[in-house]
Amino acid sequence: MSNYASYTYDAIGQLASQVKGNVGMYLDYDVTGKVTKIYSDNTKKIIILSFVYDDEGNRVMKKDHRTNAVTWYSYDGSGALAALFEQQGAGAVQLKEQPVYGSDRLGTFYRLGSNYQYTITDHVGNTRVVINRNKTADNAADIVYYADYYPFGMEVRSGGIENRYGYQGLYAEKDKETGWNNFELRNYDAAIGRWLTTDPYGQYHSPYVGMGNNPVNRIDKDGGLDDIINISKENGRFLGVTSAEGNDIIRIVNEDGSTFKQFLFGKNGSFKKSLKGLENFAGEFAEKNAGYGIKFTSFSDANKFYNAVVQSDREFGIFRAESDNSKNNYTMVLTTFAASSLELPTIMKNRLSSDITMKITMYAHSHPANTPVPSGFDIKTKLPNRSPDNDRVSHGNLKSRFGNRIPDKAQLTVPNNTTKKISYDEKRVY
């Protein structure tokens, strides 16, 4: 699209300004890359919009400084939007919308009119039609909104009431003030089919490319890694092992057989030998932003798999989750495919928050660098050090928040000796 707008970027690739004709938007960000303020002038004296976020990165407030309209967002324990409030100037804060959920968001309950409206989406999560719960007088569907889209999300046509959710509306809110789609991690401009800041995961050669330049077959639920559509969360990806030049390659494979991610695991077939028949597992993403997890109903199979993969140069974790309903018990092995990064505490915290009957009965992680003690302890004395963010502190925070739903001691697996697991808590190594 020629002459659509002009752009400038800051030193780390974040959109600094967008100018269309005589209308400009100039952006400020916080340290996590979230937009905090948008100005109408390049001296940044006239604020158009401002945003506030919670410690999980969820947007909790949006203010339009031109009209003094404020929107407040409230979330449940799993991070899903639970309610939306609005305030006009100095007026009262009013509950306006409450999402209605099934497997995904099905629609919205509008509190002021005491009315349910349901959303019909297409295969990539675009809002196509919104209908009232009650039919018309002639028993037809009461369509209150409709929209058609170009492949990258710009509207071809739309009509009806004002609608908060448009392109990939199952995952993002469209801000009418900017025309951008607000995903969890970054903003997207459907008019140009590009993200406005760089990809936190570096999935493609261009950090701004939208949906891998394949918007008909790919979706991006949070602005991080995009995904092939119609992939079931529970079994859409398979962790498999293949051989190349005598070595084992561990892969996450898409449903169509293409490789999603891979790395060299074991030399001379050592990985397959250690698994002895457990080469393939139906898996799921563990959590957004936190890595890839494989669920097992069999603890022995999970432990066998974990003991094999910790011999790699990547960090892995394992935890056993048990609830009042034994049918929901499972063990998860997970990794971020990084050598020294694993969001195991975050994943367990999210799972515990979403099911109050769940307990974590054991959890462990590995240190590929062969560090013999958990982080947060001195290697020689095994006493706590002053590092503020580490294995020791994470365990203490989990215990403080969830009490007996977390084991008293966590474990560190020592590579090259999977039978040895070092126990620790927030005070000492045992």
Image (cartoon, helix red, strand yellow):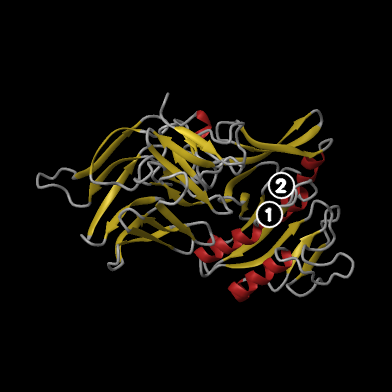
Say which quarter of the image contains residue 297: bottom right
Q: Is residue 405 left or right of residue 428?
A: left
Give 15 or 317, whichever is nearer the viewer: 15
Q: Is residue 121 left or right of residue 114?
A: right
- Mark 2 residue type: Ala
Query: Residue visible at 72% across and 42% down?
Result: 277
State how far apart marks 1 and 2 are (Cα).
8 Å
Please tell me whether residue 137 is drawn above or below residue 326 in the rendered image. Answer: above
The x and y percentages for residue 208 are 54, 35
Quarter the C terminus occupies? bottom right
Query: Residue visible at 45% across and 38% down?
Result: 18
Q: Are marks 1 and 2 in contact (CB under 8 Å)?
A: yes
Q: Which residue is mark 1?
A: 342
Query: Residue visible at 21% across and 45% down?
Result: 144
- Mark 1 residue type: Leu
Q: Residues within 10 Å of mark 1 (few under 14, many from 20)?
A: many
Q: Residues within 10 Å of mark 2 (few under 14, many from 20)?
A: few
Give 44 or 306, whichever is nearer the viewer: 44
The x and y percentages for residue 13 are 58, 40
Question: Could you tell me which secondary element the residue under label 2 belongs to?
Answer: loop
The x and y percentages for residue 64 are 35, 54
**Residue positioned most to the left:** 137
Please tell me whether residue 215 is drawn above or below residue 225 in the rendered image. Answer: above
Q: Which residue is mark 2?
A: 338
Question: Could you tell me which secondary element the residue under label 1 belongs to?
Answer: loop
